[in-house]
Image (spheres, rainbow, N blue to C red):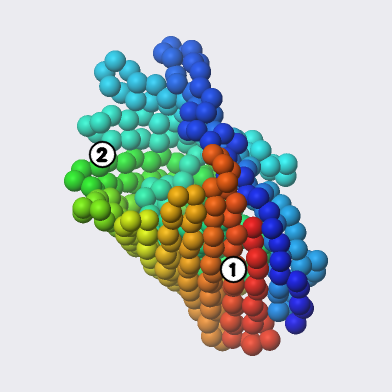
Amino acid sequence: MKKQLLASTAIVGGALMASPAAMAGNVTSGDNYAVSIKGSLWHQAYTIDDELGSAGYGRGYGFGNGEAEVHVNAKATADNGLTYGVTLELNANEEDQTAADEAYATISGSNWGLVQLGSNDGAANQMKIGSFQTNKSAVGTLGGVTALATAFHLNDVPGLLIRSDWESAGGVSDASKITYFTPRFAGFQAGISHTPDSGHTGRNRDRDNDGDLEKVTDLGINYVGKFGDVGVNVGGAYVMGDRETAAGVADGDLEVWTIGAKVDFAGFVVGADYRDNGDGPGASTAAGASDGGNWWSVGAGYSTGPWGVDAHYALGEADVTGGENTYTRYGLGVGYALAPGWKVAGDFEVIDREKPVSTLDNKSTAFIL
């Protein structure tokens, strides 16, 4: 077992500009748009102890910018009450190979709802409720850009089995799509998205016989309410579509569903979610998997003033040849708002991987700040 000194400290920058309208002005194009610019930069330091060791990652510590983006939002309202606008999320990390992470237009009316056109998460991801919303530090069950992907070199783990936020319901991410949300009525709202091809983004004209997900429709519904001082959120999503191999041969149906809930009171928040990956993307990306497996997680957090603490536990499982792969995640975190737009956050995170061949079992422990 390779041993590493587990101690580190760093600052995590919460935003380039703290206010949602930190920089504003008018852009003339027929009518005047109100333009806001904001963004985020996450700087991370981590140490890691990995039982099997990760080839090429023997140093045991590292620094990195987990995410760096500039968000530009333009919005206007017509005399008839119609609201419309454009959102651009521009990549700012030095290794990003694309100009934008998301780019989409919106149009809405109070009586009929909201339409999004372009590259953005689908209704299922935008509407889901779960444990990731209890996070007060940098990681939680969220993972991803804030720390998890950078610190843990998890090429052998499908994202659907270790994360609750990203690709949670379908695998189409920011592919070009159309999305519709109903108005919220008595706390309830529903949404639907359709994505022709998971590899089609922006003006890129992706072939429909290259192993992508095809004709993906995702449905979401949630409830947001308050009973006295207690907030209650409940949501669910269902995703369906077609899968194909890299050679363009039909590979069964895509079917994923997820449910989750969150309750908050007097600074405390508790959340949980469950996802059945069915014949989801994990069935293709997890070596030897006969299905996409399932995931469930719980989390709790508390905040007071500038301080916040959280804890989480999650379990992902998938059938493979000879048995089952099991991925257990748990951790503790603390966050402190150092100044407007700046947050210091630290996490202790463990990922335990158990496989049918015991010599492939692995446990990684990290401090991430």
Q: Secondary structure at mark 1?
A: strand
Residue type indicated by callout 2 = Pro
How many tags in the picture? 2
Nearer-the-camera pick, 295 or 312: 312
Nearer-the-camera pick, 150 or 42: 42
Q: Looking at the rendering, in which quadrant would you find the N terminus? A: bottom right
Rendered residue at 49%/61% (across/down) = 309
Q: Looking at the rendering, in which quadrant would you find the C terminus? A: bottom right
Whether residue 294 is situated above or below residue 89 in the rendered picture: below
Rendered residue at 37%/60% (across/down) = 268
Residue type indicated by callout 1 = Glu
Nearer-the-camera pick, 155 or 269: 269
Residue marked by disc 2: 183
State the image coordinates of residue 347 (x, y, percent, origin top left).
59, 63
Nearer-the-camera pick, 203 or 43: 43
For the question of whether residue 211 can be seen, the reply is: no
Q: Secondary structure at mark 2?
A: loop
State the image coordinates of residue 97 (x, y, percent, origin top left).
69, 42
Residue 255's disc number = none
Q: Earlier in the sequence, mark 1 or mark 2?
A: 2
Quarter of the image holding residue 139?
Answer: bottom right
Whether residue 321 is situated above or below residue 257 in the rendered picture: below
Viewed as shown, does residue 343 lie left or right of 177? right
Rendered residue at 25%/42% (across/down) = 184
For the question of whether residue 336 can be seen, the reply is: yes
Residue 349's disc number = 1
